[in-house]
Image (spheres, coloured by chain):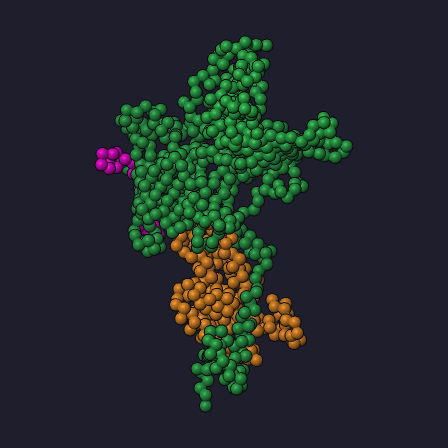
Amino acid sequence: MSDGRFEELVDVHGRNVLNVALRILGDADLARDVYQEVFLAIWRRWHQYDGSLNWGAYLYRVTVRKALELARARRPVPASPDDSEPPSAGAEPDMGLRVGELQQKLTAALARLPKRQADVFVLSRIEGLDHAAIAAILGCSRNSVRVCLHRAVKQLAREMSDYLG
Amino acid sequence: MIDHEPMRDQLVSFALGELSDVERVAVSAHVSACDRCRAELTRLEKLLACAGRRKDLSADEPQYESARAGLLAVVGGLARPKRSARAKAIWRDVMEKRLVRLAVAAVIVLALLLIVQQLGGPVRGTGLAWGDVRDAFLGQHWAHLKYDNGAEQWYNLQTGDLYLRDWDGRCVAVDHARNIRQIYDSILGQHISENRPVIYKDDVIPPWEPKTAWESVIGPWEQMAEHGGAGDWEVERHPDQVGDAQLIRFDCYLNDAAGRRLLIRQIWADPKTRLPLTVWERLQLADREKQKRESVTGTFDFPETGPASLYDLGVSRDLPVVKYYDKAPVPSVEKIMEAARAALERFPRRYRVVVWDNTRESEIDVIWRDGGQIRSDRYFNLTGERYAPYHLSLPANAQDVWRWTQTQPPISTYLLDGEREYTRHYVHPVFPDSRNEARVMRSQGTDLLPSSSKPMEEQWPYANHSPAGFEVIRDAPEEWSGYIGLRVNSADIRREYYIDPEHDFLCVRWIWWKQRAGQWEKEREYEYSGFTRLAQGQWYAAKRILVTYPDPERGTSRGGANWNIHVELLEEGDFPPDTFNGDKLLEGAKVETY
């Protein structure tokens, strides 16, 4: 593959990689770290790739993994008022803080899930992909996706029960 | 007591929207009666809503651009990764990056002559004269390589353009002259991506030197065999007796990560015909698994024509084209004029041009050019019943026009033979005043031929001006976006040129303005269109329109003219006898020399 294709790969998939990382981590700086790490890893092994790789699927997989790795390695920080989500109209006075905190708890809980369950949950509930697409990305059956998703939802609900009211 | 664990699964399915209507009603009924399950469902829905809210999060454009720039800066600072050992990539790299460029034509011919001698004299062996061999391979237009797995590659030896269609449907087209590469790869999405394969200094694309198939395909391997391989590759050259033929074989080895020396590619060429014949390539692991084969074999042929676009490779015309490059910055006036002069210089000098107007009966020119020799014969297409023998029905195509002129007496001929300029008029049956007269002038360096004799030069009307006084137009109307505008003012006259940098810097519009009572008004404008590409890659405008605007001072009204232009490239022997023979032209004419 030529170097021009690397830049093209970045142009075609870069936004998605950055956005996936941002949606998992909820932090633009961390998302940028993931974006850079994902593409640098590819660049370093650029000569090993060939035309048979489905880049879209591959990048989904590695981005979710990298972002969750970062989330696992990260120490929990208290919610801050400038968290990425504004309070919704008509919310209770403390909802802004509360929603941000809830999101952080979700990231932390995701980081503690078994990897496959976390992958499936992110791709299904955050990325909005259907089971067939997730199965193609993760290289497993649709039934396996369904089972993992159920387990992930139950586990997350259990872990976050204090925050979900 | 109800066992809530199965119900919990149902609640998850309910929250995830997986249940049928019947199941939903059943679960709803239970939830409305069970506080515990209602609380659980609320928690699940909050969890999913919390996750779902993230769907809307996305980086804004500055954030993305900053991340991209940061990444590419880091990548730029790293050592370039070693090239893939994948055999097919060798070809691509050779073709796309043109790792090895052979020098100017004279050096190439000399080098080939030496190689021919070293190889034991194919010229002697075949009984062919050296000139025959050379002519044969200089006439090649395309090298085409077809693999037994369905992949194909076409390489335009005259223009440097490259087309690939891989076994899996991936298609690539590289336009050297425009420095554009188009890729269709279903993995990258249902669109055609377009980028610039090479970054040239000052954005000036160097002209392509036409190459022979040997230079393009075998040249790089010869270089590597003689001067050492590239990266982890080594190339060896061996004589190889195949049947009765004494061929040359190049073996390409990869020194792999495990310290083994793997034969990954072989290519056979015939030194007598100076043509590559066959390639063998070992596939990489992923390709071996996907294609269920160890290697592929490709065979060369050298067709006259090849694809002209990605669409000719089977890519749908309905796909959007996504450009992954910024518009090139506008170069300076000097650079623009330099590029135009280079394009003019590159334009072939051996051709026949037919110029006619398809909208009305008028004069028709047939122009012959061979280097510095130019001849222009003018004919008249006449209307009216009594002039029927001199009438050509319009619209007509170039071939019809050319055939028609061969049945007609010319009105006049202009000839420049390199030393003298001739103007010859003939007696024409329709025009009673016509006479057999001729005028001969010694060429004074600048010829006095009418501009119609040089329709090609007319396409770059700004090229031979001094850049002084010219400025790049910064406030061009929206319709000219994508073009470069040049403006020059002198007293009450202004000329504007709009130039297409993607088509050899041809002028697309040339507007003359005149200042009247403090207002700039259009005096006339030329529009160039119908850009057509010659086999050697150069562009020309096949249509030119002139519009003249009313001039109250001179009392002229709106007018104009249309020209269709067709260029036919010729070889040395294609000119009719005496085309550029001045003495012959003067025969039977009263000659004036002063």
- Tell me, by letter, which chain the rendering colours green: B
Residue at left offset 42%, top offset 47%: B314
Please state which of residues B197 and B311 is positioned toward the viewer in this rendering: B311
Q: Chain A is which colour? A: orange
Residue B44 drawn above or below residue B508: below
Residue B585 colored in magenta in the image: no
Magenta range: B240-260
Residue at left offset 34%, top offset 25%: B132
Please state which of residues B83 and A165 is positioned toward the viewer in this rendering: A165
Q: Position of residue A57 (x, y in %)?
A: 44, 60
Please state which of residues A165 and B194 is positioned toward the viewer in this rendering: B194
Residue B523 drawn above or below residue B183: above
Residue B257 colored in magenta in the image: yes
Q: Quadrant of residue B226?
A: top left
Q: Main secondary structure of the magenta part?
A: strand
Q: Position of residue A103 (x, y in %)?
A: 56, 71
Residue farthest to the left, as pictured: B243
Task: Tell me the quarter of the image containing the C terminus of chain A.
Answer: bottom right
Residue at left offset 54%, top offset 63%: A22
Q: Quadrant of residue B439?
A: top right
